[in-house]
Image: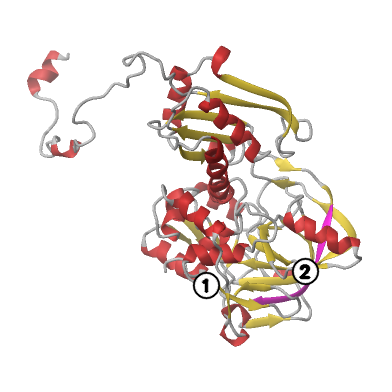
């Protein structure tokens, strides 16, 4: 399995010439983020010479849809179906003994200091160093099921993190613990394979363990091991694990921090994690995600697409594909293709999409022959198949993303574009032009590589 572990995936990227090894000394203050951003969507970055550290830093391990497809050992068109199947049929993880777990090669329970690891500062106005690629794992004490997510984690002290908890499953478990006057145990796994990373972002009902979704995606149980100081199971092959507790009734300043919409999330009084233990592999590799890069956007976008297509299919069964586009930060813009059979289905698909997630702000619905992964094709459909007086759907006074600065703290408007062709249109009215033989032509068969270019008589006529 090419993505069995973080290290096996790096080896695969290196073998396929998609890992840029950077030996030049780099600073954690912006330089790591800047170099990674330059390589975004092209190659992963592997920094071997980080200023003041012997531990290397890696970023950009999956910055294209094709790479996620390769990790899942499928193609980009089958990603959503495979992901949806895994969400609907999780597979239990396999517990291993601590002596068998690479992440237990080094155990630190005293004199904890997060400065051990090369944690970057990403953006100009960020409040400091942030862990951006840690799987944040908590356990429901009643059901014993775990919940996995990714949160921004500010380094607030040598053994303390500030955490932004959005009102989702982890927040729910924390509020239950806080109301009972107790902390919520947690673990943060850094440096896991891209399949487990993707599974952590699944949109699931409360009580589903995302590590079990990772097992289903891998088509074999994910190996996990129990932590040293908390009752949490973590991926056994993780590079680094931070163990700790979210403290009850404690809030400290956190932020600002550059977020996925390419703006800063504001400073506020946020929850605090007290670190109680650290384990890591020999010669650990620190993994960071540069916010708002393709890796960050796709991690959020692909699981949302899997949820979106299921929602739209309940209303429009002939939905063919969905795409949360990078230009819409893989959160705000949804593009949907359908095989239209009844008038009105385009607008029904818009309504279903807006109901799927409060993040979705603009929806474009097109016919099935439009390539929704090609922005030029989508723009063409808007330009030639849309009229605002009859194809536009606007809804005011809706809940949106609080990170969208154009909203009033998340309160705003949403819009849908029905760009499907009317079923009763004349056959030639929307007939796309086509050159016979174009698809099968290999232009290189027509080019004379030994030619010296334009003939002399053509050059003379052109004077």
Q: Is residue 28 visible?
A: yes
Q: Residues within 10 Å of mark 1 (few under 14, many from 20)?
A: some
Give the answer, above or below, for where 47 lies relative to 355. below
Mark 2 or 1, nearer chain start? 2
Q: Is residue 178 left or right of residue 306?
A: right
Residue at the spot 12% in from the left edge and 36% down from the top edge: 448
What is the spatial separation of the Cα atoms under label 2 and label 1, in whole angstroms? 24 Å
Task: Tell me which segment is drawn in magenta.
Answer: 270-280
Choose between 446 and 39: the one closer to the eye: 446
* Quadrant containing the C terminus in the rendered view: top left
Q: Which x, y percent locates residue 447?
A: 15, 35
Q: Residues within 10 Å of mark 2 (few under 14, many from 20)?
A: few
Q: Mark 1 falls on what kind of element?
A: loop
Q: Mark 2 falls on what kind of element?
A: loop
Query: In which quarter of the view is residue 199 placed?
Result: bottom right
Q: Which x, y percent locates residue 138?
A: 73, 66
- Confirm whether the magenta stretch covers residue 277: yes
- Disc 1 marks which residue? 221
Give the answer, above or below, for where 184 lies relative to 422. below
- Disc 2 marks which residue? 142
Q: Main secondary structure of the magenta part?
A: strand
Residue at the spot 46% in from the left edge and 67% down from the top edge: 219
* Quadrant containing the N terminus in the rendered view: bottom left
Q: Which mark is residue 70?
A: none
């Amino acid at each position: 399995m090419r993505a069995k572990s973080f290290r096996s995936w790096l080896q695969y990227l290196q073998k396929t010439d998609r890992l840029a090894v950077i030996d030049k000394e780099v600073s954690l203050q912006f330089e790591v983020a800047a170099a990674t951003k330059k390589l975004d969507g092209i190659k992963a970055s592997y920094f071997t010479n980080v200023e003041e550290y012997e531990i290397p830093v890696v970023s950009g391990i999956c910055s294209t849809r094709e790479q996620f497809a390769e990790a899942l050992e499928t193609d980009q068109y089958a990603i959503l179906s495979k992901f949806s199947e895994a969400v609907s049929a999780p597979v239990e993880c396999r517990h291993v003994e601590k002596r068998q777990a690479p992440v237990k090669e080094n155990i630190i329970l005293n004199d904890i200091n997060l400065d051990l690891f090369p944690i970057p500062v990403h953006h100009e106005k960020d409040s400091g160093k942030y862990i951006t690629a840690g799987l944040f794992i908590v356990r429901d004490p009643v059901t014993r099921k775990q919940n996995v997510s990714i949160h921004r984690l500010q380094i607030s002290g040598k053994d303390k993190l500030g955490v932004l908890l959005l009102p989702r499953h982890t927040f729910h478990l924390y509020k239950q613990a806080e109301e009972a006057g107790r902390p919520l145990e947690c673990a943060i796994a850094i440096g896991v394979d891209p399949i487990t990373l993707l599974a952590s972002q699944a949109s699931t009902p409360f009580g589903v363990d995302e590590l079990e979704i990772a097992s289903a995606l891998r088509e074999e149980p994910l190996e996990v091991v129990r932590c040293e100081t908390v009752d949490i199971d973590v991926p056994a092959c993780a590079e680094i694990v931070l163990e700790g507790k979210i403290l009850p009734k404690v809030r400290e300043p956190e932020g600002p921090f550059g977020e996925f919409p390419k703006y800063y999330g504001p400073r506020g009084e946020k929850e605090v994690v007290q670190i109680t233990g650290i384990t890591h592999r020999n010669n650990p590799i620190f993994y960071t995600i540069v916010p708002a890069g393709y890796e960050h956007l796709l991690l959020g976008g692909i699981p949302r697409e899997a949820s979106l297509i299921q929602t739209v299919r309940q209303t429009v069964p002939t939905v063919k594909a969905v795409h949360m586009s990078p230009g819409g930060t893989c959160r705000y813009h949804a593009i949907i293709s359908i095989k239209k059979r009844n008038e009105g289905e385009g607008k029904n698909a818009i309504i279903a999409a807006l109901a799927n997630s409060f993040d979705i702000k603009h929806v474009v619905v097109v016919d099935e022959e439009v390539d929704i992964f090609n922005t030029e094709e989508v723009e063409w459909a808007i330009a030639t198949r849309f009229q605002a007086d009859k194809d536009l759907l606007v809804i005011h006074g809706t809940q949106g993303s609080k990170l969208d600065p154009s909203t009033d703290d998340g309160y705003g408007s949403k819009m849908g574009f029905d760009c499907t062709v009317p079923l009763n249109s004349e056959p030639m009215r929307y007939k796309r032009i086509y050159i016979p033989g174009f698809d099968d032509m290999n232009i290189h068969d027509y080019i004379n590589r030994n030619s010296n270019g334009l003939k002399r008589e053509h050059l003379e006529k052109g004077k």
